[in-house]
Amino acid sequence: MNSLEHEAVAPAKQLRGGISIRNVSKVYGSGRSSFMAVDSCSIEIAPGELHVIVGPSGCGKTTLLNAIAGFHSISSGEIYLDGELLCGPGKPQAAPGADRVVVFQNGALFPWKTILDNLTYGPVIQGLMTKKDAQNLARERMATAGLSGFEDSYPGELSSGMARRVEIARALLNDPKVLLLDEPFRGMDNLTKSIMHESLLQIYDRNEVTVFFITHDIEEAAFLGSRVSVMTTRPGRIKETIDVDIPRPRDYRVLTSDKFLGLMGRIVDAVADEAQKAFEAGERELA
């Protein structure tokens, strides 16, 4: 027998985090004050995909993210994660879990804890890791995010971009199936945002985690996404899903390519049409 037949073959890593959003609707309020935020919305997101949602303000992007996270109920439809029901008939609201972690635009670090303590707090307090194991893994995540040397710093001593990288590193510490990003780079200057985009792509390429990313920034969507879904004005539905046929790893040299500019034009046309409808309907931003 050939000696090679005795060697164990390492199984290929199975990607996790497939999301299936099926005919989801969400109504807020009751009676005459009620309104439909999302109507019969369906999206299929493959495991390991970086899926970006864009659309006019108030179209329901955050509503979908909150439903996946377990922060809000849905009125009808179903949401599945890796084939298991998160919410649907008889179960209108998903239970929050460590398999789905949210990074918000306003940040959520403990200002009185060091960066290392911020990263290790969750796994240790939940009894998932010993303090030593959590610290070792946290240092690895920090190195991946370009944060080595800041273990003993406090959030107030970091730039907004560095603080956001800490939050993403903290989110990945529990090895979630899905990373939910709610406009995490909103309000940053263009230079900081460009650095954060490349940093996120590096983290994504190394971790193979599913990312559900919502934004108003069309260039951000095209540069980061595996696919981009454009939502209609309220009540939100998926108007179009666009494949981003740009190889990874990506850097900012792609921004001037004909392929990228053509992709941008297609997304801009789809979003601008919906933004005009929202303006004409008197929509106002729902924070």
Image (cartoon, helix red, strand yellow):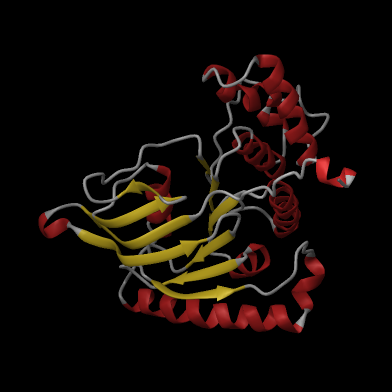
222 with respect to 38 (left or right) = right
* Residue occupying image coordinates x 50% and y 66%: 54
- Whether residue 286 is visible to the viewer of this picture, yes or no, is yes
- Please indicate whether residue 190 sits to the left or right of residue 87 in the image: right
Point out residue 235 in the picture as x, y percentages from the top left corner: 30, 68
The percent position of residue 17, horizontal first and vertical second, equals 53, 50
Q: Nearer the viewer, residue 55 or 90?
A: 90
Where is residue 243? Give x, y as percent.
59, 74
Looking at this rendering, what residue extends furthest in the front direction? 1
In this view of the protein, can residue 287 be seen by the observer?
Answer: no
Please, which residue is most extreme toward the right here? 3
Residue 286 x %, y %: 37, 57
Identity of the residue drawn at 18% across and 57% down = 34
Observer-nearest of 247 and 214: 247
Residue pictured at 21% horizontal, 45% vertical: 90
73 relative to 261, above or below:
above
Q: Residue at x 70, y 20 (%)?
A: 133
Quadrant occupied by the N terminus: top right
Q: Quadrant of residue 107?
A: top right
Q: What is the tally of numbered marks visible in this picture?
A: 0
Residue 163's place in the image compared with 215, above or below, is above
Within the image, what quadrant is residue 122 found in?
top right
